């Protein structure tokens, strides 16, 4: 069945799709009004995307690479970052600097003494220690049997101290041994000159342990009690000659007592 011309003319014309006109570049970059938002029906493709770095892309890349290298240096070298902080950074007030030697750098906080002052104090300590040491002692631990006096019609110029054989004999004072060995009447004898020039004589010992030139101090053992020479029993004969070997004999008991060593 064919259609009439009238019917053909009345056939509706086909719809032509409308292509949106591209916007002006100025309009595309223009910022929207502050209170205007995207149209509710605007397609997703019409929304603006962030601009790429553009011409400064190589600068951003270089900065990122440099930052990564600097951050990795401590891990490679093993060095720890140096953190500088003071007590005031933590609300603790001013800090006190302490040197590696342990001394405070603040001179007002603690004052030390000089080497000269330290040496002077050490000398004082040595002097006080020396002062506590005996300067004069009794030459042996025995019993006084004969004094510095007349005996049997003659003068006895010394002290006789009786003691068992082998009892130690010590130097009564500091000095130097001027003679040690056989002596007439004494059997064996030791002669020691002190700092004042006096000569101390120790006789009748069997054994002695010093020789000429030896330096001795008060209390040093020099011999042992014996019974040699003109002796009636084991004892020590002790004499002091003032000013030298040929000096005038003086009372040893009195000399010792004047120096704090009483028999």
Image (tube, helix red, strand yellow):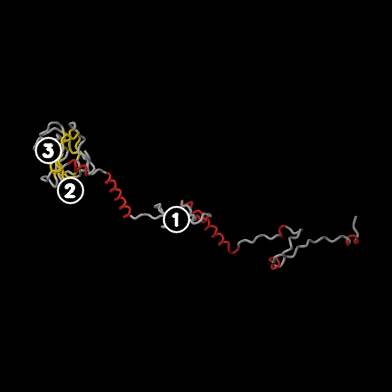
Horizontally, residue 137 falls left or right of residue 156, namely right
Q: Earlier in the sequence, mark 1 or mark 3?
A: 1
Please state the horizontal and vertical placement of residue 159, each as a whole percent of the image: 16, 38
Mark 1 vs 2: CB contact within 8 A: no
Q: Nearer the viewer, residue 78 or 256?
A: 256
Q: Quadrant of the C terminus?
A: top left
Q: How much space separates mark 1 and mark 3, taking CA atoms?
A: 81 Å
Label 1 residue SS: loop
Instruction: Please tell me whether mark 1 or mark 2 is closer to you in this view.
Output: 2
Task: Using a 10 Å C-alpha cutoff, classify the residue at mark 2 as few (fewer than 14 neighbours), some (14 to 19) or many (20 or more).
Answer: few
Q: How much space separates mark 3 and mark 2, taking CA atoms?
A: 27 Å
Against 147, residue 100 (above or below) is below
Q: Quadrant of residue 216?
A: top left
Instruction: Please tell me whether mark 1 or mark 3 is closer to you in this view.
Output: 3
Q: How much space separates mark 1 and mark 2, taking CA atoms?
A: 58 Å
Please state the horizontal and vertical placement of residue 61, each as a whole percent of the image: 56, 59
Q: Nearer the viewer, residue 152 or 67?
A: 152
Residue on which the image places disc 3? 150
Horizontally, residue 134 falls left or right of residue 157, namely right
Q: Earlier in the sequence, mark 1 or mark 2?
A: 1
Residue occupying image coordinates x 18% and y 32%: 163
Residue on which the image places disc 2? 196
Residue on which the image places disc 1? 97
């Amino acid at each position: 069945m064919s259609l009439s011309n009238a019917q053909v003319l009345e056939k509706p014309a086909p719809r032509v799709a409308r292509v949106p006109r591209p916007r002006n570049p100025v309009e595309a970059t223009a910022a929207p009004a502050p209170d205007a938002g995207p149209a509710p029906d605007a397609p997703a493709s019409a929304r603006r995307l962030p601009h790429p770095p553009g011409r400064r892309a190589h600068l951003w890349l270089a900065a990122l690479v440099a930052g990564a290298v600097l951050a990795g240096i401590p891990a490679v070298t093993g060095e720890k970052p140096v953190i500088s902080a003071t007590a005031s950074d933590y609300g603790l007030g001013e800090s006190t600097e302490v040197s590696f030697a342990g001394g405070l750098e603040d001179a007002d906080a603690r004052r030390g003494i000089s080497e000269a002052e330290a040496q002077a104090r050490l000398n004082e300590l040595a002097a006080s220690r020396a002062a506590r040491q005996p300067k004069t002692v009794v030459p042996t631990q025995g019993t006084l049997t004969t004094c510095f006096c007349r005996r049997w019609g003659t003068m006895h110029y010394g002290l006789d101290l009786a003691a068992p054989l082998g009892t130690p004999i010590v130097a009564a004072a500091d000095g130097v041994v001027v003679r040690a060995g056989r002596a007439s009447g004494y059997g064996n004898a030791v002669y020691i000159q002190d700092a004042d020039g006096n000569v101390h004589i120790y006789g009748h010992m069997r054994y002695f342990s010093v020789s000429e030139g030896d330096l001795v101090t008060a209390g040093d053992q020099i011999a042992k009690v014996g019974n040699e020479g003109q002796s009636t029993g084991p004892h020590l004969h002790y004499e002091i000659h003032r000013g030298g070997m040929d000096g005038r004999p003086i009372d040893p008991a009195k000399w010792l007592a004047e120096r704090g060593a009483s028999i």
